[in-house]
Amino acid sequence: MVLVLAIGDFYVPHRCCELAQRFRELLAPGKIQHVLCTGNVCSDEIEALLRRVSFDVHIARGELDGPAWPERVVVSIEQIRFGLCHGHQVLPWSGRTGDAFTATASSVSAEATAHVRALHALRRDMGVDVLVAGMAERPALTSGKLGGLVVQPGSATGAPRVTDPWPSDKADNSCKTSNAPGFVLMDVHGSHVTLYTYVQDRDDPQQVHVEKHVFERPDPTASALLL
Amino acid sequence: MTRSNNRASGATGTAPPTSATAAAAAVFAAAKASTLDEARLLREALARVAHQSLRMQRQWKGGQYAEAVVAACDVAAELRVPVGVGSPSSTAEDTTAPARSGRLLSPRSYYDLYLAVLQALRVLETSLWSLLQSQPLSVLPFYEHAQHSPYVVARLYPLITVGSVYVRSRQAPAEDVLRDLLEMCAGVQHPERGLFLRAYLLQAMKDKLPDEGGEYAGSAQGSIAFLLRNFTEMNRLWVRMQRDCPAGERARREHERRQLQSLVGANVACLARLQALTVEMYRDTVLPQLTEQVLECQDVLAQECLMDCIVQAFPDALHVATLPHLLQTCAALRVGVDVRSVLTGLADRLGRFARADAAHHTLLREADALQTLLQWVPQVLDSQRAASALSDELQLYRALLGFLLVAFPEQRQHCDALLGLCAKAVSQRLPPPAPPPTSVDETEDVSPPAPTTTSELPPTRPDTPMSATRRRRPSGDGQAAAATPAPAADTDDPDVVPLLERILLLPLHHYTELEALASLAAYPTVMQLLPLENQRALAAEVLRRSLPPGSTGRGVAALPLLEALLGLVRPLLEQMPGEEVMYHRRTGVPYLAVDGELVRGYEAQQHLVAQIVYLLRTDDLRLFVRLRQALLSGGPARTRLTLPPLAFALLRLLRVYRARHGPAACDKLLEFVHQVLSDLADVDASTALRMHLQGAAAVDASELSDDRFLYEFMAHAYVLFEEEIADSRSQFSSLVLIVGTLGTLHRLDADNYESLASKAVKHASRLLTRADQCLALCACSTLFSDVGGGRWEASRALGCLERAARAARSSVAPAERALLLLDVLNRAMLILEELHERAPDTARDAAPNDVWDDFCRFTADTVDSVRDLLTRLEPDASGGKAAAARLARALAYLRDVRELHEGVFLRLHGGAA
């Protein structure tokens, strides 16, 4: 059992003030083996926090990060190949959202929007089973036509986007108006991945909704014939 | 005698240097000799004590009880040894019997002897007690035996021992025995001996005093009287130790008296432990008598120690009831008494008292404790003005503030007054040539600081051109830094700065609401007394405490509160003299530096400053304007970090602003955003470009009817791209973001979209490297291939891809050529898929149209090109393997979704395999 954390789009302080205390508690050191961060870490403090979570931290470059981190990363964990990319390089952006996920909460949704299709094309091109990408407003999982999975952990801080509507028409710049913060934890076992999506409740910060999904890598013999 | 002569000559210091050293050596030798003498004296006395003690025990075992008691007298007789300091002549008249050639024991050694004697007497006590348990004997004969010795001291010690057993056996009323012993102890008037004797009396009797609920019958009044009397006598003896002392020995004698203070204090402690002591008794009898003694003795040391002892010994509730009396006494103490530490102790105790239980608050309120303290403390301090260190004074304010904040948190004006006193205390101690900045004496100012620094600092007026603060010369800054030292750093006392910090942290911990902290006008003033680094750390702490989600605060909704907050965190906001800005060699990003060295850790603090905007709970633009103005005073190294959140928050406000104030009001908001972004563009063009794109996205989502601002934001992004971004990597990534944003905008007028999109294509084809051109053109193809969004121009999408393929083929390295063509291929496949997904009619049924054919042909051609390239590549050429794997994956997908890609396969030259 290997635990892999997919997390990213912190935007502290650019869009949001802090990582929620509840998440800090959940991300205690020593439990998680690998961290795949989709970028937009922005502050050294958050990076230090990630490096405390695990020794093996991979960070892809978000649009607000400096040039220190790579655009794409490929990591093999057990029998699964993971790709990591923030996703702002993957055009078009249109229709990027987590709606598909909430519509079919109990199962992994099929690819829907142009952006997610482009992400799947990138996943195929990189030759990875699971692509971890950012730019979603909350955790979203989408499977490809022929297998493969795109995991979008959403924003760990619930950082809002300028295009997001306000929950009320009160002028309140505090973090309360942000989206629901979330991340995805993956339990990798051989070619089998159990995914847990964590979403913090917007009204009760102590409450975290966890949902479980399963991904099985398709039998590689089919594609091996082609290679 | 020779010793004292030597000492005198050394002390006068009139001798020439050579003989002065000789005299010093002589003094040293004399001191050494005297300690040697003293040690021998003590050793001999201890040996005799041991001997007599053994004799006593032997006789007791032999049943010769009377002789044993007499032997105990002999043991106690050793305590008649001469004791004291100073010249032997002064005590010669006291040292009668076994005085040995004027040698003296110091009180320290006398104490060792005293302990040895006490041990022997304890043996006597237990033996006598066990004897009484076994036989019904009367204690009275023993009581009389003990008085057989001719010497007073030798007689009284065993008498006290037997007396304590007498009380314990209940054969005599405790009160009578106590009174008797107390009378007799008056017979010893030698200071040290009397002190120790009475200390023994107290020790032997303290658990036998009649008390409420105690074992021994009698009135508690009698016990109090006994303790007060004993205290009075002991204090007199203790003070007399000093009087008999020659001037030269003063310091040493004071030191020795300090060692004995606990003997006197034990009486007070005993009083405090009496269960029967009521508030009335304490207020009417005990405290007046104690303080009368304290005041009467006119001795600095005694007053200091005893006041401290009184404050520490008695329960807090008693202090609360007698606060005025206590403070009045403090004010009447002699000059030179360290009254501050007494008051500090008192305030600390009251603070703990208030913290312990909420019910204590009402008690304090009823006693009007705060008013009394505030009324008396200045008087007390005035009476002692000359004689204390700054840190003692601050310690007192710290304690008072702690008490105030716990017990009376709502009394902010007093808290403020105390902080003002701190500021006054510090600025008064400063040497006149280096005064604190003039603003120290002002309260609540957010104007530019001291005139001396104004020329060096960027003015905080609105609309300051950023260029004024850029690239300042370090030499001038260095001078300015020397001219304005941090006031508190000036003092030699290392405690002052930590104390001031503790004082400033107290309100921070107690007031969770920012308003409360902001109402303390003196707070920033005290803060300015600290060295800059500490000021900044404290300001950061202020922010950390007020920012959500760390706080439950209500945030900032009005301008005055924002002003106050900005005043509090000003050390973080402003560029200080001595600081300069260094620009990253490649990216041109500004960093903060001092003396050519990058400042570490400033970014974390500036991230806190950047979050001030999240405190604003209002759509009043004036607050945002004020915040921008404050942030701008930080110089480029800071605004690079602090402006983006401000801009983002404003953009996020847009929707709600439109809903509340109507579309017309949004112009003002958006113009202000433009201002902020143009400030940002001066320091970090690449982030400014990204923020402009965010602006476009915000306007697009805000349901504003016309696209003026939308176009404006995009146009500015292009201008920044063209004029400010020179690095080729940065150009590529910025262009991709521009294209990505443009693709999501729905409210752009068709003509505007057209001009912006063709501009993007033009920029893409002009990037520096072929690889960048190819990838950027692939990205641009999405601008015309959004089938679902209604932006579908097949010929232009295909045109982009063809240009991309051309750029790829122009690349020199064959492997790179193949890899780039694969990127083009993937993009073409995506467009096919999109086309199929969104408009299947266009794709297949509706008249075998050219578009579908064109894309299929283009895809097939690209596949052929890549295959062709790969066959000509060396098998182990770098990139060749990767390209082959990518091609295989692309073909596998083409095959797997065969029904979609039939058109491609038909046109492949090399077939499907």
Image (cartoon, coloured by chain):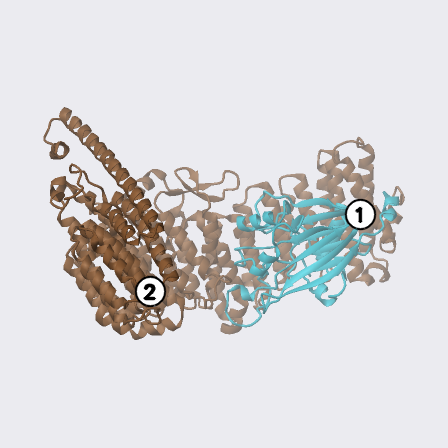
Chain colours: A cyan, B brown
**Which amino acid does the dot numbered 2 rest on?**
Ser
**Which amino acid does the dot numbered 1 rest on?**
Phe
Residue at left 45%, top 60%?
B545
Q: Position of residue B912 (x, y in %)?
A: 89, 45
Res B443 visible: no
According to the image, label 2 marks what residue? B169
Q: In the rendered view of the protein, which quadrant contains the C terminus of chain B?
A: top right
Q: Position of residue A196 (x, y in %)?
A: 70, 59
Element type at marker 2?
loop
Q: Nearer the viewer, residue A148 or A112?
A: A148
Q: In the rendered view of the protein, which quadrant contains the N terminus of chain B?
A: top left
Q: Position of residue B515 (x, y in %)?
A: 39, 67
Residue at left 35%, top 50%?
B62
Residue at left 75%, top 42%?
B821
> What is the chain letter for disc 1?
B
Mark 1 crowd level (few <14, some 14–19, many ≥20, 10 Å Cα):
many
